[in-house]
Image: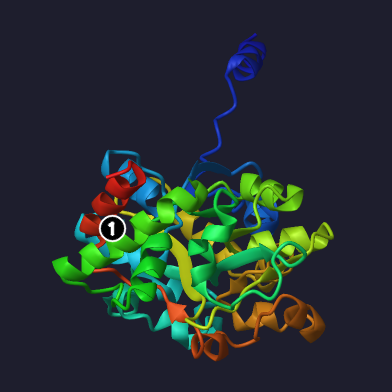
Amino acid sequence: MLAGATLLLATALPALAQEKLQYFTWSGYELPEFNPGFLAAHPDGVEATMFGDDDDAFTKVKAGFRPDVAHPCYDKVARWNKEGLLQPIDTSRIKNWDSIFPVFKDLPDIQAGDGKVWMVPWDWGNTSILYRTDLIENPEMSWNMLWDKQYAGRLATIDAVHDTPLVAAILAGVNPFDMTPEEMDKVAEKLREQRPLLSAYTTDMTSVEQSLASGALVAAMTWNASATSLKKQGVSVEFMKPKEGMLTWSCGFVLLKDAKNVDLAYDFINSRLEAAAGKYLIEAYGYGSSMKSAFAEVPKATLDELQLPDDPEVMLKTTIFTGPMKQNDDLAKMFERVKAGG
């Protein structure tokens, strides 16, 4: 009788819910192909929430949203840290730490001292102009294309402080990472000059790609993935190498101060740093992996087609690396005013 009662009780009890890692990331970075090792050990073990851009992510976390792991870009890490949102990551628990390119693992603002970092670099890529080669003849290889009046209404740009205002600063002859109030006024004027020419400010790359494919847009500021996607579809596009320099960025994983699933977080980050995950990132999106081991898995012909060197330092010699912007908050407010017509 006792055994039967015990059996009845056991079958009546619900199974214990599996702990899920809470992951806060860009749309498209939640794919299971990026962390097969983690999912093999923890089936259905991650729940992803998406953000539109770094500023959106920062605002939500600052307001109280608490994931375990988030995926901001390098230029914003100091800002997150200043608000006390992060805890250091112990690199001795990161299995492939030594395989990360030194140019990324040695970035100054990620150092937390004593074998610890504030961010584990994972991906890097470029921001440039993706344009229709069949609709724009003999283009000047310059960011000025996004200010060209002959394409009014058929241009789009990225709605993020570290993209469009940064390029406006470059064209205005201003250091985008440290500017005086007078220099910021010059940047604002350059942005006002561009505003009436644009079809959209957006981070929705799917809609941008559709508009480029249809010809509604002839040029837009995008990331590598849009160029990779449209070329696979047979659309006549080229990812420009502006004479002023493409922008290069690096993003990675941070561990939130109040993370509830720290062990799962380390398992997740380690899975993302496996060579297969980096290989998928390179081949599917055209972005660079932070891992030497990932590049070793990709044929040179594929890298050439994607316009990626197998060593990011080669690219950084000709591009502008997106680092921390001292006037980020003031620049963000100014950008919002310009977009609103001010």
In the drawing, does residue 228 fall left or right of residue 146? right
Q: Is residue 133 above or below residue 303?
A: above
* Quadrant that contains the N terminus: top right
Query: Can you name the residue that lies furthest to the top here?
Result: 1
Q: Quadrant of residue 325?
A: bottom left
Q: Which residue is mark 1?
A: 80
Residue 297 seen from this side: no
Q: Residue at x 55, y 53 (%)?
A: 152
| Within-10-Å neighbours for mark 1: few <14, some 14–19, many 20+ | some
Query: Can you name the residue that lies furthest to the left here?
Result: 181
* Quadrant that contains the C terminus: top left
Q: Position of residue 78 (x, y in %)?
A: 27, 66
Camera-nearest residue between 217 and 335: 217
Q: Residue at x 41, y 69 (%)?
A: 167
Query: Can you name the residue that lies furthest to the right here?
Result: 234
Q: Amino acid at mark 1?
A: Trp
